[in-house]
Image (spheres, helix red, strand yellow):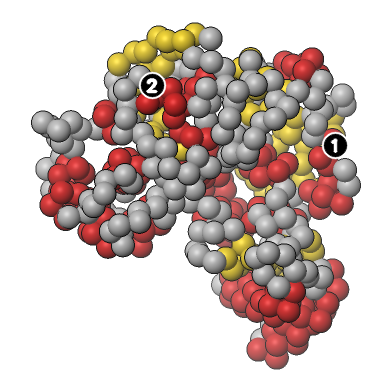
Amino acid sequence: MDGGRIHRFHVARDVEEALSLLSAYGGKGALLAGGVDLLRGPLARVEGLIDITRMGLSSVAEARGGVTVGATSTLTQILESPAARRYVRGILVEVMRAVAVPPLRNMATLGGALVSAHPWADLPTALVALGAEARWRGEKEGKAPVEDLYRGEFRKTFRTAVLIEVSLPPWDGAFAYEKVGRTRYDIALVNACCGLGIEDGTIRWARVAVGARPDRGERLPEIEAALVGREPGEKLWTEIQELVEARVEVGDDRRAGRAWRRKTAGVLVRRALIRAARGAAA
Amino acid sequence: MKLSFELNGVAQYLEADPGERLLSLLRRIGMKSVKEGCDTGDCGACTILIDGRAVRSCLMVAPQVQGKRVTTLEGLGTVDDPHPLQRAFLEAGAVQCGFCTPGMVVIAYELLSRNDDPTPDEVREAIAGNLCRCTGYVKIVDAVLLAARWKREGRWR
């Protein structure tokens, strides 16, 4: 890290102050939460840092049957919060434990992960699968499903806005998260988050998202539709695995090739579905 | 800018540039246990505790610790009066070149402050982000488990 050009450090007391500072810097100010992305790279244009971790946005609470997470909550706070642990059979604990290593989880915030939105990251895939909704404040208040944000110009939005919180809706069923990296703690080469609701031996709803394709996590609606109304079991898992292999949009990058990603995406979706089905039936 | 925070139990009032890395500041004031390895948060050699939680001081600027409680290895033990974790590292032979050791001890301290009966896998998860290029990790895991046993037996100060 080279903070050579930074000449001011501000601690924003509330969202209004953060927004007015951000606007005063006109592109040369940066919001600082966990810092694991911002302070990792060169800070070529940044002259002022605006610390947003002391504005009271670090809470995790049950809300409307789901859970609402303040933007500056660290991944560790989420992991250790009773509300998050109870949410959909502990899926948030499973996802958070798949992200990096404990000291980085002590620093990284959910808001930072959502806004940085690295294509290989674990959290975007999980947030999209879980139907997360983001609330922010810029010139106006904004609210949108994370999935829709990622399809639009979210980077532009967050240049002049502060993310407030992320809400996760209740699900009557279970989710599972799978990833493959070069090591257990490395970034994903492919990741997948799947959820199932099962009633009377039949799948009532399904959520399937695949990320690090190498593009960011996206749902596969065609796969979800192919699961609904079916009976969970080996025959279905094999059929779905083949369908994922046929339909998932994957590409090459320096970390992995397209053919390998295609195969691996099928395997990860299969594994996640098997575990989700077990959880949903329990 | 003026900065005040607690370092190893002692109040500090000092000047820092707003963009000064916390790692650099700590070394500047004598905390040489805090090592610069990768400078990107990957190696864990600069691990310290802030309000009892392990963080990477290379990925922080100094002003972030305003009003907080900072602990480095110097605050855990000294040469004359080593911390039980440090004694366990010696006894298990968990030290070779020593560059990673401060970060390892600090990360183990955080783990044992929350869980004094960790499984070997829990120890491995805790230290997974702290790289050691000498030991092969086996003796480091042994050392942390030994220190945990001592803690359960009431042999920590």
Coordinates of residue A136 in the picture (x, y in percent): 78, 33
- Secondary element type, mark 1: helix
- Residue drawn 24% across and 32% down? B76
**Residue A68 disc label:** none
Marks 2/1: CA–CA distance: 39 Å
Coordinates of residue A176 in the picture (x, y in percent): 61, 66
Coordinates of residue A72 in the picture (x, y in percent): 62, 34
**Which of the image's four quarters has the C terminus of chain A?**
bottom right
Q: Where does label 1 land, which residue?
A: A156
Binning the other alpha carbons within 10 Å of mark 1 as few (below 14), some (14 to 19) or many (20 upward) gives few
Binning the other alpha carbons within 10 Å of mark 2 as few (below 14), some (14 to 19) or many (20 upward) gives few
Q: Where does label 2 land, which residue?
A: B28
For the residue pair A234 and A30, the one nearer the viewer reads as: A30
Coordinates of residue B146 in the picture (x, y in percent): 18, 54
- Residue drawn 56% across and 54% down? A99
Question: In this rendering, which labeled residue sits more in front, label 2 or label 1?
Answer: 2
Q: Relative to B122, is A178 above or below?
A: below
Amino acid tagged 2: Arg
Q: Is residue A85 left or right of residue A70?
A: left
Amino acid tagged 1: Lys
Asked whether the residues under marks 2 and 1 belong to the same chain, the reply is no
- Residue drawn 72% across and 82% down? A241
- Residue drawn 35% across and 62% down? B121
Q: Chain of mark 2?
A: B
